[in-house]
Amino acid sequence: MASTAMAETAAPADDSKKEEPKSPPAHMRDEVLLKFVGTATLILGIVLLVSSSIAIAVLSILKYELGAWLPILPLSLLVILVGGLVNGYFRKVIDRAMHPKKEEPPRPPQYGFMYPYQMPAPVYPMRMPNPPVAMPRPAAPLPSAAKNRFCIMCGKQIPMEAKFCPYCRHAYTA
């Protein structure tokens, strides 16, 4: 009798330690319902697929007409696909709503410290541009045109006494 009294007093202590699961917020109740609708649609599609494939196998053995049963197979696959997509999507929606991402503080800039304990290179002030350079003297005028001629191959000016053009190597006889 003493042991039953102790067991009755110990039971509430265990119940107080159990944590109740968090109930979804009011705006999430529809999403929770749709999660279960997605799961139910997925299960319904699988049951429909298995039962219709068994029924088609049995009816084909018994030589019955299968025309009415054949559209059930692709429809059951479609129900499975829709149920899986709805289920997966709303699980993600509920998970994001129940466990939002925590904003990370901005990371400090990474400095390239070298081992052992070397400081980064110092920042130097901006250098001033070099002073302008005086313009070079103009080139000497070309020799007179009477002492020069034009090459018949490349069109460059060459001296009259040249035996070949220094640019294109065309040979001249006189």
Image (spheres, rainbow, N blue to C red):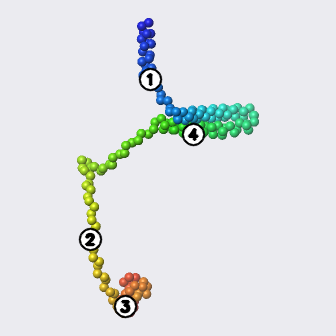
In this rendered view, identify the residue nearer to me: 74 or 137. Answer: 137
Q: Could you say whether the residue bearing mark 4 is in a helix, strand or loop?
A: helix
Q: Residues within 10 Å of mark 2 (few under 14, many from 20)?
A: few
Cα separation, mark 3 vs mark 2, equals 40 Å
Q: Where is residue 164? Give x, y as percent.
A: 38, 87
Left or right: 98, with 123 as reference point: right
| Mark 3 vs 1, N-terminal side | 1
* Disc 2 residue type (three-letter): Pro
Q: Could you say whether the residue bearing mark 1 is in a helix, strand or loop?
A: loop
Q: Where is residue 17? Give x, y as percent.
A: 42, 22
Q: Which mark is residue 145?
A: 3
* Disc 3 residue type (three-letter): Ala
Q: Residues within 10 Å of mark 4 (few under 14, many from 20)?
A: some
* Disc 4 residue type (three-letter): Leu
Decide: marks 4, 3 in contact (CB < 8 A)? no
Residue hosting label 1: 18
Q: Is residue 162 visible?
A: no
Image point (61%, 37%), residue name: 80
Cα separation, mark 1 vs mark 2, equals 82 Å
In this rendered view, identify the residue nearer to me: 3 or 135. Answer: 135
Q: Which image quadrant: the C terminus?
A: bottom left
67, above or below 129, in the image: above
138, above or below 31, in the image: below
Quarter assignment of residue 152: bottom left
